[in-house]
Image: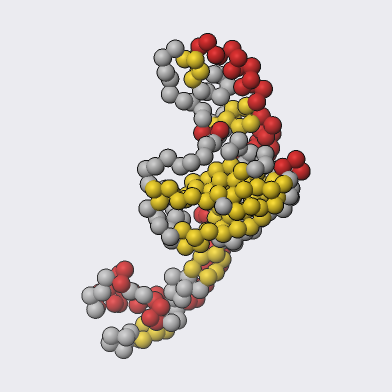
Amino acid sequence: KKTVNLASGRYEQLKFDVTDVSKTYTIQAQGVDGIDLYVADSRNPTHLAHDLASQCEETTLISLNDGHPKFKPGTFYLSLRAADQKSDGQASLLLREVPRGQAAAGHRLGARGKSPARPNTIQCDNCKRHIPKGSLAMHSLQCHRRNAFCKVCDKVFPRRHFARHQKLEHAPLACPACGTECADQKALQAHRMQSCKMRPVRCMFCAMMVYLGDRDAHQKDCGTRPCVCLKCNGQFLKREMRYHLTTKHGMRPEDVSFRDYM
């Protein structure tokens, strides 16, 4: 458990290690109202560049497990920030390792929508929870004042943070790396992971990190460099080496490493 001093407009950066991929790692921030929490496998995650986020929610909670494509042993980074000046103050950050299949501690208001129907209940038209019939009138008065349902996310958010939620997650955003305009925050994260020309990728021949937009030209040049087969001393272009080793020397394609022919 860590204590972090939050101020609006400033990210506080921390990191943690994943050592057991059979567990779920939960990160929960408490103490002040209105905390944004971001997690990524690279340094300095922000609202524009992250892998997981909890924003504008009643409970600031992120769960990281084997359902995430980047989940593996190693270091992950997290950032926190206060939503506004009213949220400035000390926040407590709690990291838990939860065995697979066990419910994680903490609760998200956004996850409460569309609860299963039970006898003698009616679904609230605002938060989508099933409420006992006798309590619906009182619940509705409080619910519409306190909660707002996002039809895009299919989740409930505190009404005091709803306008900010719409701005953060559903307004157009420009990629900070290449400037491409994306429809919303989700589209921006997909763009960053898949098609951003400024995304660092590895050359298949020399393992050098290059930008995605430069990779084809780099690999075209890198693949034409001459190299000598370590098995028969024959001379080939680097891009031809895998075909040569698999067809002439019986190696499996997955066992061929271009790093042997730097």
* Residue 144 quadrant: top right
The total of numbered circles placed on residues is: 0
Question: Which residue is depicted at the point 52% across and 36% down?
Answer: 107
Question: Which residue is depicted at the point 49% across and 50% down?
Answer: 96
Question: Which residue is depicted at the point 39% across and 82% down?
Answer: 261
* Residue sitting nearer the eye, 44 or 249: 44
Quick check: can you spot residue 132? Answer: yes
Residue 221 placement (x, y as % from top left): 50, 76
Which residue occupies the extreme bottom position in the image? 233
* Residue sitting nearer the eye, 87 or 233: 87
Residue 11 placement (x, y as % from top left): 68, 54
**Quadrant (top left, top right, bottom left, bottom right) of the C terminus:** bottom left
* Residue 234 quadrant: bottom left
Q: Could you tell whether 239 is left or right of 144 in the image?
A: left
- On screen, 132 above or below 2? above
Q: Could you tell whether 44 is left or right of 238 in the image?
A: right
Which residue occupies the extreme left position in the image? 250
* Residue sitting nearer the eye, 231 or 222: 231
Residue 150 placement (x, y as % from top left): 59, 30
Question: Which residue is depicted at the point 62% across and 27% down?
Answer: 148
Check the image and tell me how it is coloured: secondary structure
- On screen, 119 above or below 189? above
Quick check: can you spot residue 171? Answer: no
Q: Could you tell whether 255 is left or right of 6 in the image?
A: left
Which residue occupies the extreme right position in the image? 85
* Residue sitting nearer the eye, 244 or 120: 120
Residue 254 placement (x, y as % from top left): 31, 68
